[in-house]
Image (spheres, grey):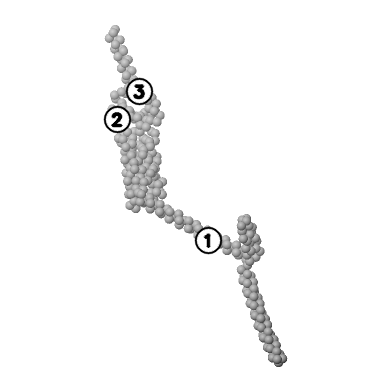
Amino acid sequence: MQVLLFAAVAAVVLGLVALALSIRVVTQYQKGVVFRLGRVHRVAEPGLTFIIPVIDQMRKVSLRIVTMPIQSQGIITRDNVSIDVAGVAYFRVSDAVRSVVAIENVGSAINQFAQTTLRNVVGQHTLDQTLAETDEINVNIREILDRTTTEWGVLVTLVELKDIQLPESMKRAMAKQAEAEREKRAKIIAAEGEAAAAAALGEASDTMMQHPLALQLRNLQSLVEIGVDRNTTVVFPSPLMSTIGELGSFLRREEKSSDEVVHDLLARASSGDAAGTSTGGRALVTR
């Protein structure tokens, strides 16, 4: 009886151990690849699953998106500028069996392949294209990665250039270029403003020529604007041609008046000399 009892207890213990070894729990974001005697037997879905101890083995594969940084790479662009470019890639496993069977370490493989692809793609562009066309470069890198990683059961969802480091000499040159570009735009805008102002003044002068009173109204408006300040000297403007004409008339009147004064003085002087001669003669006769 003791032997039978011992055998029953041993059988129960072995059964519990076997049951514990055969139970597997697959999380919602995972899938389990079950190998039976070294060959792929099935894919276990999330939840509770059972395997045969010793005979079966299970590899759990995460289906979540993985964020993988791409280390900074020293790259020479097509226009022979040395830059350092870093990036980041996002990928997820689409086929659990391939990701286990086709490649040993899918994360390390994608990291190395992404570095070489980043170096090759950026090296085919100039510096200006690298800085301005980052979206196109990201798409090209992702497409190249997808063509290879699809065979590994991995889908690359996104690739982004994270950081672009330029040499100090290139930064100074680009700063000078940007400053020159801003000065050029400022001069162009100022010239366009002068041209527009000149055109507006021309239209205004044409309107004033058609309506002479408009100039007087504009003068009165200017006086109102100037009169805001108390310490103001107001000069009443007049048309230029009328001012020149009045000045000429004034000069002619002044010249005529001066001629009349000189003539009068000469006449008086002549009459004075004649009177003195006649007086002297009479005095001489009297004596």
Label 1 neighbourhood size at 10 Å, few (<14), some (14-19), many (20+)?
few
Residue at x 32% of width, y 37% of height: 108
Q: Is residue 198 above or below residue 61?
A: below
Quote the CA–CA distance across marks 3 and 1.
86 Å
Image coordinates for residue 23, horizontal then vertical, percent: 35, 23
Q: Give the foreground label among 1 and 2.
A: 1
Image coordinates for residue 269, horizontal then vertical, percent: 66, 83
Q: Are marks 3 and 2 in contact (CB under 8 Å)?
A: no
User: Which residue in the structure is indicated by mark 1?
Assistant: 195
| 263 or 10, nearer to the observer | 263
Q: Earlier in the sequence, mark 3 or mark 2?
A: 3
Residue at x 63% of width, y 69% of height: 243
Place residue 276 in its image quadrant: bottom right
Report the disc number at residue 39. Answer: 2
* Residue 230 can be seen in this image: yes
Q: Earlier in the sequence, mark 1 or mark 2?
A: 2
The amino acid sitting under disc 1 is Ala
Q: Is residue 134 left or right of residue 205?
A: left
Report the disc number at residue 23. Answer: 3
Please state, as top left, top right, bottom left or bottom right, where the C terminus lies in the image. Answer: bottom right
The amino acid sitting under disc 3 is Ile
The amino acid sitting under disc 2 is Arg
Question: In the structure shown, which secondary structural element does the residue marked by tag 3 occupy?
Answer: strand
Which residue is outermost to the top? 1
Question: In the structure shown, which secondary structural element does the residue marked by tag 1 occupy?
Answer: helix
Label 2 neighbourhood size at 10 Å, few (<14), some (14-19), many (20+)?
few
* Residue 117 can be seen in this image: no
Image coordinates for residue 76, horizontal then vertical, percent: 32, 49
Q: Is residue 59 above or below residue 165?
A: above
Quote the CA–CA distance across marks 3 and 2.
20 Å
Question: In the structure shown, which secondary structural element does the residue marked by tag 2 occupy?
Answer: strand
